[in-house]
């Protein structure tokens, strides 16, 4: 099993969710996060005071899935989340050792 | 419990008994006024002219009530004048609650929003009590050049009959409540400079002393019938200054005091190093709108009549405010590249501040000039001067109110015109010559100087007393974790995790 962690622009969440739904991914976890990469932050000015906001709001989508679905899922996420501009985000993939569905106590790929 | 309620009722009954004086219905021992005399008094009432019924020996109408003891007629209020004055009083209260509370509350960080609201509410209660006990009497009863006396303490003698010193047609109790709203918003303006870092107990003590040391004398000197700087109403005034709705009394006193207090208090922890952006520009904008609307009561209501001068004040207030709210963000746009909502809001408030002393004396053309000045000069102080000197005037009370109030007092001297306000010819003699550098300017400068010294020296003394008695700053960890939770035991917002998504 693999876990995909995708950091995307907040307004791309709906498109990513729909794209994953179309290829049969049935669940995901979504978190509001803040961070920065090459895009850096922006400046806000309130009267005479200037503040640099380093951390920009992003959405983190986490999906755990079986190995054979991985490649397709990553490619639809990338396609859906892309604007071509700096700050589109990143996708990380890692191994998952075990998964348990709490209700039925199914384990492994059955559970995700 | 029952006993204490009973006692309260008895106390309330005693107090109201003094206010609702039984109307003496006994017929006057005088000839009935002729129809012509009655009509002429009605005309006077219609035009807010001098009342015939004021005169002891020449009673001409029934628009007054006869008092056998003193053998005089006391004039009765006019319905139109009272209606406008009560409306104006409510509008001015609306400026503080919730206008200013939201304007300032939105500009602080989330952890301090309630502290600003608590301070506004506290001041409303405190000042009302002071006003009732002795404040009104010290400001508006005749007494001396600097302060009145205690004849109207506990509002004794302040009835629904007008006080001819201030208006022939507005009930004196309505006038007293109207002026109370000014006394409330003035100390509340100071909160802006010292936001997010002053102990609540220290604010309580400071505001109590500030009203006695600065507001009451200043308001009496400018507006009291025998005030030292009441150029319009007092023929014996030492300084022939004019201030229609409170450029010196409200904005200069609060603004200059705010600067001194914020210097003595020191900067917020992390000022200049940590970001301290407004937690809600939306609340700030909502508050600004309420201030603008409420300010019509403040400015046009200061005519203490629904007359031609009030109509002019309403017009000039609109022109100056709209122009300033246009010019400030325009300046931002040119200098910084973006016009901000806070720029629109700040411009509007600056316009309102600067037109305040002038609104009943200047033409709409004068108001437009004032609007441009209000959009540029306070803006320059908030953007540049503040960062040059590095003082932590948290919400720009000094930049907007002290600078704006001083500018307004000066421009009033330059732009006051006879055509707008015929009263300028009564006691001001040759000071108004319908020119930019008329002699009135010098009188205004003298009044500005006295106000500035009273506000700054007075505040320095009070602040040092408060510092010695209760201390000014809360403990460091209280300031860092927020005043709301530590000083008031509440939080402004409870948002469950995930609700923001």
Image: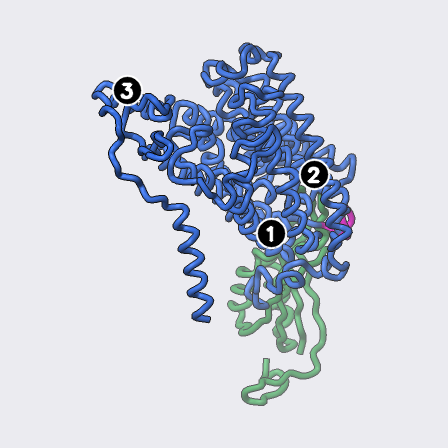
Chain colours: A green, B blue
Residue under label 2: A48
Chain bearing mark 2: A
In whole angstroms, how far apart are the C-alphas of marks 1 and 3? 50 Å
Magenta segment: B269-275
The answer as to whether the residues below labels 1 and 2 share one chain is no
Q: Which residue is mark 3?
A: B40
Question: Circle 1 sits on which residue?
Answer: B119
Q: Are marks 1 and 2 in contact (CB under 8 Å)?
A: no
Which quadrant of the figure contains the C terminus of chain B? Answer: bottom right
Contact? badges 3 and 2 (CB < 8 Å): no
Disc with the residue nearer the chain's start (1 vs 3): 3
Q: Image height check: is B267 above or below B365?
A: below
Frontmost of labels 1 and 3 is: 3
> How busy is the neighbourhood of tag 1: few (under 14 within 10 Å), some, or many (20 plus)?
some
Q: Nearer the viewer, residue B181 or B6?
A: B6
- Asked whether A2 or B118 is in front, the reply is B118
Task: Tell me the distance, in whole angstroms, between the alpha carbons under discs 3 and 2.
Answer: 58 Å
1 or 2: mark nearer the eye: 1
* Image x and y of residue B417, in percent: 51, 15
User: Between B253 and A32, which is closer to the camera in this rendering?
Assistant: B253
The image shows residue B377 at horizontal and vertical percentages of: 65, 27
């Amino acid at each position: 099993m693999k876990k995909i962690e995708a950091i995307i622009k907040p307004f791309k969440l709906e498109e990513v969710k729909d794209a994953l739904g179309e290829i049969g991914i049935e669940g995901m976890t979504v978190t509001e996060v803040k961070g920065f990469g090459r895009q850096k932050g922006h400046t806000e000015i309130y009267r005479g005071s200037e503040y640099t906001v380093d951390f920009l709001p992003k959405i983190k989508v986490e999906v755990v899935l079986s190995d054979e679905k991985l490649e397709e899922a990553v490619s639809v996420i990338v396609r859906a989340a892309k604007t071509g501009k700096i700050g589109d985000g990143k996708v990380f993939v890692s191994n998952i050792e075990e998964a348990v569905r709490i209700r039925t106590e199914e384990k492994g790929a059955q559970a995700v | 419990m029952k006993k204490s309620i009973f006692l309260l009722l008895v106390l309330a009954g005693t107090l109201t008994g003094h206010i609702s004086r039984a109307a003496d219905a006994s017929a006057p021992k005088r000839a009935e006024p002729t129809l012509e005399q009655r009509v002429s008094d009605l005309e006077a009432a219609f035009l807010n002219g001098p009342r015939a019924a004021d005169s002891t020996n020449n009673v001409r109408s029934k628009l007054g009530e006869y008092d056998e003891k003193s053998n005089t007629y006391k004039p009765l209020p006019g319905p139109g004048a009272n209606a406008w004055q009560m409306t104006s009083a409510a509008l001015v209260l609306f400026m503080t609650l919730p206008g200013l509370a939201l304007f300032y509350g939105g500009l602080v960080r989330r952890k301090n929003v309630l502290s600003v609201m608590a301070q506004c509410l506290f001041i409303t209660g405190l000042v009302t009590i002071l006003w009732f006990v002795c404040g009104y009497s010290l400001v508006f009863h005749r007494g001396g050049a600097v302060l009145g006396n205690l004849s109207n303490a506990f509002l004794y003698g302040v009835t629904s009959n007008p006080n001819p010193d201030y208006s022939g047609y507005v009930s004196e109790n309505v006038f007293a409540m109207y002026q109370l709203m000014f006394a409330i918003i003035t100390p509340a303006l100071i909160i802006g400079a010292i936001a997010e870092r002053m102990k609540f107990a220290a604010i309580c003590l400071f505001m109590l002393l500030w009203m006695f040391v600065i507001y009451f004398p200043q308001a009496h000197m400018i507006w009291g019938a025998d005030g030292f700087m009441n150029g319009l109403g007092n023929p014996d005034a030492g300084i022939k200054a004019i201030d229609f709705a409170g450029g010196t009394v409200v904005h200069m006193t609060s603004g200059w005091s705010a600067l001194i207090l914020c210097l003595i208090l020191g900067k917020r922890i992390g000022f200049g190093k940590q970001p301290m952006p407004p937690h809600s520009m939306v609340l700030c904008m909502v508050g600004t709108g309420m201030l603008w609307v409420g300010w019509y009561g403040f400015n046009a209501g200061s005519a203490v009549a629904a007359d031609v001068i009030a109509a002019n004040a309403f017009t000039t207030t609109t022109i100056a405010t709209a122009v300033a709210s246009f010019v400030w963000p325009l300046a931002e746009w040119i200098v910084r590249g973006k016009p901000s909502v806070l720029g629109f809001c700040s411009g509007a408030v600056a316009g309102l501040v600067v037109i305040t002393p002038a609104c009943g004396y200047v033409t709409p053309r004068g108001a437009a000039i004032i609007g441009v000045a209000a959009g540029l000069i306070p803006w320059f102080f908030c953007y540049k001067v503040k960062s040059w000197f590095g003082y932590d005037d948290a919400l720009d009370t000094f930049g907007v109110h002290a600078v704006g109030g001083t500018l307004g007092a000066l421009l009033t001297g330059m732009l006051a015109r006879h055509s707008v306000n015929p009263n300028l010819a009564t006691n001001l003699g040759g000071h108004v010559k319908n020119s930019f550098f008329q002699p009135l300017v010098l009188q205004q400068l003298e009044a500005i100087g006295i106000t500035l010294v009273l506000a700054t020296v007075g505040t320095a003394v009070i602040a040092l007393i408060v510092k010695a008695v209760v201390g000014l700053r809360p403990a460091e960890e209280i300031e860092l974790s927020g005043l709301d939770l530590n000083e008031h035991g509440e939080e402004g917002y409870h948002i469950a995790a995930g609700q923001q998504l």
